[in-house]
Amino acid sequence: MINRSDVVTATRRIEGRVRKTPVIAVDLATLPSPTLAKRAATSTPPVVLKLEYLQHTGSFKARGAFNRILAAREAGQLRKTGVVTASGGNAGVAVAHVARSLVTRATVFVPLTAPRIKVDKLLSLGARVHRIGERYQDAYDAAAKHAVDSGALFCHAYDQPEVCAGQGTLAIELERQTEGLDTLLVAVGGGGLMAGVAAALEGRVQVIGVEPVSIPTLAESLAADRPVDVSVSGVCVDSLGATRIGDIAHHVAARAGVRSLLVGDGHIVEARRYLWHHFRIAVEYGAATALAPLLSGHYRPEPGERVAVVLCGANTDPADLVVHPALD
């Protein structure tokens, strides 16, 4: 599958094409949980937040898209027919951004249910957008067929070695920005980001995959010892709504001992509000998922434990930052 050397290679390949996103330190004593605050006041170092939502296109996905397409170009696999993907969200926008940067064609298949705002973003980046079917799988099947028929390079949203390795460059960057880490919390949907950072940090840092109770792709795959389909619902469906974890992500998680931690929608909403009210950081629910265990007390750092959290994306509607109609 992938390992740290693949991520190091990806880091070199995409250098200068992605942003080095900043980090900030947050004192746990300021968190809303009185129990955590009391414990942190004397024994817990500040938590590091990796502000990856400041990446090109508003999410970490640009890293994997650049590595996938640049690696293909190096291998002579990038043709005039360009690249194709299936995604109505961050992955599609990232592929379109990379294609425009490299002056090649991007074709993106999205389901009919894809939000108009995402489709408009794809069009603004010059992508050719095809809307087909009610489910993501319909768009995926159409994109795969287009790749075969046209010779366009297929870019998976989360389950290709180059994509996962590219996402993992975030971890190499984070290592250089900190004085050492013990634990990294990262949100999981299809698992591409988790796979990349876990491969990069294997044997060095404990990686915890945080996922909504309503979309437990990692938890179910670890329990079954293989990727399995799960039902998808809740506030994170637009960013963490994969129906099953990727094969690469499952393999890396099992090999590297990645833990799954489940959190409820209410805690995810509160984490997103916390970031807005205290830092004026507006992220999508999927990104807030990674912080939710610390705020809710579902994860309590040990004394002296050095913890980091990846805030992975910010393609969100800020209108519901104060009130979420489904939960208030």
Image (cartoon, rainbow, N blue to C red):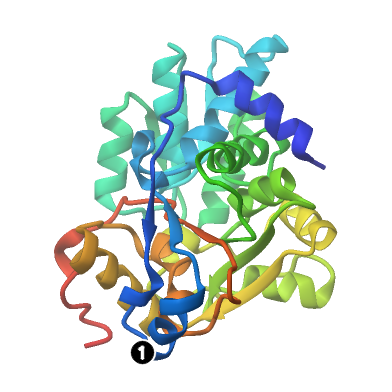
Image spot of residue 320 (x, y percent): 18, 69
Residue nearest the observer in this picture, 62 or 4:
4
Kind of element beneath mark 1: helix
Q: How many marks?
A: 1
117 lies left or right of 288: left
Image spot of residue 165 (x, y percent): 67, 37
Residue nearest the observer in this picture, 137 or 48:
48
Image spot of residue 86 (x, y percent): 52, 42
Q: Amino acid at mark 1?
A: Pro
Can you identify the residue that label 1 sits on?
34
Q: Residues within 10 Å of mark 1 (few under 14, many from 20)?
A: few
Which residue does the image show at 47% across and 31% down from the upper left?
Answer: 95
Which residue does the image show at 59% across and 67% down from the upper left?
Answer: 305
- State which quadrant residue 196 falls in: top right
Which residue does the image show at 41% across and 48% down from the upper left?
Answer: 89
- State which quadrant residue 31 falls in: bottom left
